[in-house]
Amino acid sequence: MKWDWNAVSDFMPHFWDGLLVTLQALALGSLISFALGLVWALLMRTPTRWVRWPVGVVTEFVRNTPLLVQLFFLFYVLPEWGVTFSALTTGVFAIGLHYSTYTMQVYRAGIEAVPAGQWEAATALNLPRVRTWQVVILPQAIRRVIPALGNYVIAMLKDTPLLMAITVLEMLGQARLYSQEHFQFTEPLTVIGVAFIVISCLASLLLRALERRLVH
Amino acid sequence: MVSGSRAAMAPPLRNDRGTNKPDPVGGSTAGTTRRSLLAGVAALGALGAAGCTRVATASTTDGGDLLDRLKAAGVVRLGIAGEIPFGYIDKDGELTGEAPELARVIFKRLGVDKVQPVPTEFGSLIPGLNSQQFDVVAAGMYVNAERCEQVIFADPDYQMLDSFIVRKGNPKDLHNYKDIVAKKAKFATGTGYAEIQYAVEAGYKESDILIVPDQVAGLNAVEAGRVDAFAGTALTTREVVKKSGKAEATDAFAPLVDGKPHVDGGAFAFRPTETKLRDAFNVELHALKKSGELFRILRPFGFTKAEMTDLTAKELCGEGVSG
Amino acid sequence: MTSGLWDLVLKGIWTTIQLLVFSALLAAAVSFVVGVARTHRRWIVRFLAGFYTEVFRGTSALVMIFWVFFVLPPAFGWQLVPMWAGTLALGLTYGAYGSEIVRGALKAVDPAQQEGGIALSFTPWQRMRLILLPQAVPEMIPPFSNLLIELLKGTALVSVMGMGDLAFSANLVRLALQESAEIYTYLLLIYFVIAFLLTRVMRGLEKKLKAGVGKAPQRGVAAHELKRAETTGVSGGGVA
């Protein structure tokens, strides 16, 4: 196998462009999934069936269908209904929505793991409901689940290449574009493959350090 | 993710179980999983051995033996890119288009009766051809110097100019690549399209070009306002805007290559080692051109006399490259 | 949508199912081999297995698919038929996740069981085969079931390569009809139905295997805790 270092150096500027888009998509997608996941988790705790059932069905549906197909759906079908966003926005929203169904489970586990004594103490102290959530329950719940959320951030990183299917030029999209013009795929693809592994490993190390600090 | 503190108790003794079935030591469960695991691996191995997992990429006979192999197999796989009218699957799920229809006729004359479509993305046609996912590219691919370094082309079966898809009324008044650059319009084209180079040569910044997977995505991008123009062949744009109320196709124009107006020719592509097949194909192609049957085959797809050509692949590949 | 187009979709469903089954088998094989290797006595075996796991868990499945399709041919001189290329890429990637599940489940078996096996002069292989695996496997089923659904979603990635699976067939329909709403809605529903059926099958398998080791499904808070911990990786803090 011939390896052309020139191809690597030619590709590097495109690589940095792609990396920037990848990290943007990851950051925004994570934020959306954290926020939306919390919303779903709280909605699932409402007493009325009429809220729990639709939320449950929708999240099950989103969780069990491929992200790629959801991306295509949002990218091709929404404009047919008159709603158009940029490709990156669509992609970020799709990733955020898809992973919010996972973070919802994580939040749910965290909330349920808060000892019942905490709820009882809050009632005894006459704290209103919202305040109980704000000050007592959520801080404990979220602290506990940060490692699990971190794992999903890493998973989201590895799903960002799907965005190339809806014309977003993140790392894989850049590699493919380069290969179609210069007919050399090996070098750019290996570069971004290694980049993903390195970033994932760094992120897991960071996560483990975070976990050690947070979880006593 | 299994919680470690839930220690598993030893399996209860046989006579404590409520079921009637006696379980041998180790359990039918271990047997099931181990046996099914081994069976699975064995099946995988057998399938691998039986089902030809790999194909050699280099052909050994001089000139290539693909034609003989195709004749023996009775079917040729055509790589198409879902582009109306060149090679596509129509709304009844049937393979059709100018290239597949032409291929049907020519391959029949060469002794291969059936054609099988292998649809893929335009940008994956050349890699797919070279990695043997199909035998011929039948997508009306333009012949140019870069592509000639990767594949060999038959002589073009048609010639074509470019055109843009723009919003109805052509609000930005875009008629060629110079307009796009001058008005700083948002521009899109398809993966691996020759139009990318035309725009770059006219002065458009390559990283600003939106690359979409196919012409329908390009139409959608124009309709949705994500871009101002999508570039494709004149026939493609004409066909695809037929179903759209919000977009139209501009008049056909010749892109400038090296400053001179350039007419493209679209042709069938073969792997570089398959010169015998390509030459046999050319013989039949020229016969069809002479007899006028080529035009008859292409006309239903919107081709007119203006698209008929005598260009050769050698010319379009440029000097210094064996066409 | 005409019947001709539905034929395309059905062909796509068949390709997807084939790809799913093959890559699931490969992933299962890899999971067990690598997962067991992670608990080996020898340091070098554990290290190699760990290295494999880190590399393949860190890589993106789509990048791996492209790599197998485009880099392997020029590198090694032969090209895998698309079905096998996809199987290899997906099987190796998801096998790395599976190996973590296997390792975790093996570790979760009560050490007393291991010791009992050693006391009874079982060889390591006998210990693994007769004591550890039968108890570990039923614990593995719920996480494996989740992984199988992830693998189903992963099979859709081959459509980006142009391989003719279910997602790609929807692409062809979109090009033929120039409208996307109908086909992509059907697509989502079809994937959901397949995922639903898979989950049911795996749940049935779990029940059968658990009954085999005397752990028929329990009721009550404890079992709920168990299920929750397994599916989310969060261990319960204080339980009231």
Image (spheres, coloured by chain):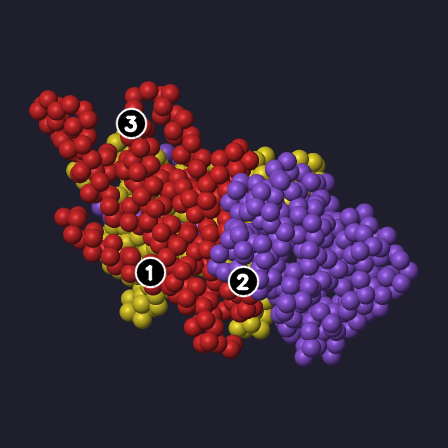
Chain colours: A red, B purple, C yellow
The foreground one among B242 and B82 is B242
User: Which of B60 and B312 lies nearest the eye of the viewer?
Assistant: B312
Nearer to the camera, A64 or A34: A34
The CA distance from mark 3 to mark 2 is 58 Å
Question: Residue A32 vs residue A209: left or right?
Answer: right
Residue B322 visible in the current orientation: yes
Residue at 63% in and 69% down: B258
**Position in image of residue C26 (x %, y %):** 48, 57
Dot 1 amino acid type: Ile
- Identify residue for label 1: A199
Image mark count = 3
| Residue depicted at x 38% and y 59% | A19
Residue B195 higher or lower than C134, as above or below: below
Asked whether B16 or B86 is in front, the reply is B86
In the rendering, at what x and y percent does residue C25 appear? 49, 54
In the rendered image, which residue does mark 2 sit on? B203
Residue position for label 3: A45
